[in-house]
Image: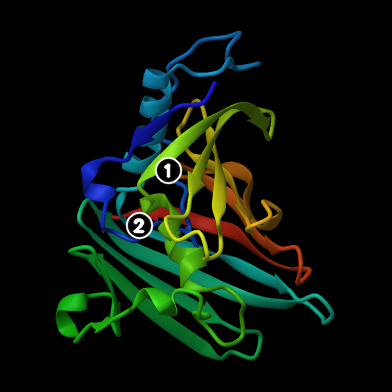
Amino acid sequence: MRNTFSLPLFYRGRFFCVLLLATLIAVPPLGAQFKFREPPNRQNPDALEEREGDRVWEQFLVNRHIGSFQLEGVLVYRPGRAPSRTYKLQLSGNWQNGSELTRVALTGEDGQHEDKSVLLEGGRTFLVNDQDSRCTEPVAVESGQLDEPIFESLPFTWADLLMPFLNWDNANYEGPDRYLGRPAHRFSLLNPEPQSFPVRVVVTVDEDYAALLKADFHDGDDVRVKRLRIGGFKQFDNEWMFSELTWSNRPQRESVTLRVRSFKLLP
């Protein structure tokens, strides 16, 4: 069964976050279960009715507003025909409804340190020089710049971090799935600009936690070109977070994997 529903109003006009790099990271802490169905549906989930599909998708979007946080880990870049490179990564920010500030700090094996911050506010995106955006003069980021690398040493782009596809006008429920041994559901989003990549994104959401498990990015021939996928979850102190996240590019035969070493919510 397929059904279409509108995203919450406050998402229209934004062209993201969240993250990860988280997304970026794009997976919320798993402190409170969203679970709305009991076994055996959890083992072999049935297709959702329209109301249930709305509930899972909207909860997934709401879960991204986690407040202030800090995440540290190791980033491994595997080029297609070159040795892998390893970086230390720190991701921090404050994600609220209507205002999302994210800072990405990268340290290479040679000790070179880089950091950049991005602020999403009022339906626009800005680069800032400091985690406290009130102390800087923000520089607007135009939509055409989203495919540019955040750091020259990595293929990871602002679009990979900001995930603008979450702000497309509608989502189509495609059906149940299982991933990492967990009950899940697939939602398909179509690009309002069909000449741009990706033309379609298929997002797989965990049924219990309404958390992102993977996202597949398709071209105009509906061939999967890129993929973002969670490799597992882990409890850090009292908070649950993904333990591994990988972005892969099939044509380029390259990937970037983030292994999380610590995560915490800040007051």
Can see residue 33? Answer: no
Choose top left, top right, bottom left or bottom right for residue 125.
bottom left
Choose top left, top right, bottom left or bottom right for residue 34.
top left
Q: Label 1, on which residue?
A: 29
Say the numbered circle drawn on residue 266. Answer: none
Please provide percent x and percent y for residue 204: 56, 38
Query: Taking 91 as reference, is 187 above or below it?
Result: above
Residue type beneath disc 2: Phe
SS of the residue under disc 1: loop
Please provide percent x and percent y for residue 222: 67, 51
Q: Split into 4 quadrants, where in the image is the N terminus? A: top right
The residue at the far left in this view is: 134
Nearer to the camera, 227 or 84: 227
Compute the Cα span from label 2 to label 1. 10 Å
Q: Label 2, on which residue?
A: 69
Q: Total label count?
A: 2
Label 2, residues with CA under 10 Å away: few <14, some 14-19, many ≥20: some
Query: Taking 77 as reference, is 257 above or below it?
Result: above
Label 1, residues with CA under 10 Å away: few <14, some 14-19, many ≥20: many
Query: Taking 202 as reference, is 267 above or below it?
Result: below
Nearer to the camera, 191 or 180: 191
- Left or right: 42, with 48 as reference point: right
The residue at the far right in this view is: 81
Q: Are the residues tagged 2 and 1 within 8 Å (C-beta)? A: yes
Choose top left, top right, bottom left or bottom right for residue 63.
top left
Residue type beneath disc 1: Pro
SS of the residue under disc 2: strand
